[in-house]
Amino acid sequence: MSISEDRERRYQDILDYVRYLEQRTQEMEAEIALLRREVKYYKQEIDKLMAPPLIEGVLLEVLDEDRAVVKSTTGPNLIVSISGNVDKEKLLPGTYVVLNQRGSAVVDILPMREDPAVRAMEIIEKPKTRYGDVGGLNKQIQELKEVVELPLKNPNALKELGIEPPKGVLLYGPPGCGKTLLAKAVAGESDATFIRLVASELAQKFVGEGARMVRELFALARRKAPSIVLIDEIDAIAAKRLDIGTSGEREIHRTLTQLLAELDGFDPLDNVRVIATTNRIDVLDPAILRPGRFDRVIEIPLPDLVGRLEIFRIHTKNMKTGGDINLNVLAKMSEGATGADIKAICTEAGFTALRNGRMYVTYEDFVNAIRKVLKDRFRPYSNEVEYLPEMRDSEGKRLVI
């Protein structure tokens, strides 16, 4: 090998090694850049963990361009400064804001939202329940049409007469007679949003929490108007107020006062109607029953014979039956039963058929279900002569009760 060839080979080896070093340098620079990004990310995470938490507050009033009155969730009302990067046009009373813990300055605006307890309430945008799903309450349905459905669907009719629509309706009666179902049917017929809560959810531990939930409940109802608010078992917060009571009772009274203010306060309810239910109308505070709050008090009694027959027809219309089922006899046999009892009877009759290996329900299944559900209240129908044909089973054998 000549000297020139040897130099050429060594030069090529050095050139290849330089290229290798350049490639490794690029790889190391890319790895360094990646590690720097990771270091920056973890520094930011450490800064977030080490930074003091921000405080949620509610804006009460804007004093001037740089100051505002804020109600802090951790303490009293504060007069704080407003950060320059906050859109001051969005600072309206009632807005949720973010406060810096060190200087308590307003540094951001939170989006409007409902309380988690309010979001947990049963909200049905368009209930599918109709008046046809309610049996034995024709008179009560007519009253609700006048005081709830008509003002929501045709408010101009009342305006032309020069009268204000009723704000609230109180339904009272024994449990299981269809008070909640009736409220759902009114909402379904009115194409209104249905918001349901149990009044005991408004009895909160901390001072002012129950009243705040009431305010947010009605604010939600106004945003979703036309809407119907159903307050189940209102006696949990609307019992008669006493001069002497525990701190818990006083807090419940504050919640009741806020509810009365929402019903009969300065802010109009517009297309919001309130329906309340109770089993104990005798314990309610007189202030909640006066006109202007719950304008109409409607009794939902135990269904009579015709009502029980209608309820049986509603719950058996989709059931597969074997033989003739005389609903008149079943209605007479279930005297004293509520609508919920009759629904339970139909369900139990279906399970009885399944236990016997049948895919259809017989008359005997209904009788046995009535005996099981009503128990001590069961009264066999005694007029066997008049109703003898209906008291036989599918094989023609006489049924002994």
Image: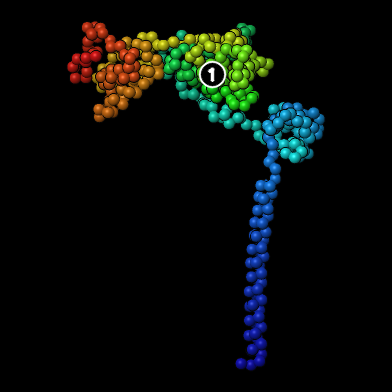
The image quadrant where one finds the C terminus is top left
How far across and down, in percent of the image, does residue 391 sit?
Answer: 23, 13
Residue at the (62%, 19%) spot, across then down? 250
Closer to the camera, 320 or 51? 51
How far across and down, in percent of the image, does residue 384 sit?
Answer: 23, 8
Residue 115 is left or right of residue 380, and the answer is right
Closer to the camera, 5 or 148? 148
Q: Name the residue under label 1.
A: 236
In this rendering, does residue 74 appear at all? Answer: yes
Closer to the camera, 367 or 12? 367
To which quarter of the image does residue 20 belong?
A: bottom right
Task: Identify residue type, mark 1.
Answer: Ala
In this rendering, does residue 182 appear at all? Answer: no
To which quarter of the image does residue 373 belong?
A: top left
- Secondary structure of residue under mark 1: helix
The image quadrant where one finds the N terminus is bottom right
Closer to the camera, 188 or 356? 356
How far across and down, in percent of the image, does residue 268 sit?
Answer: 65, 17
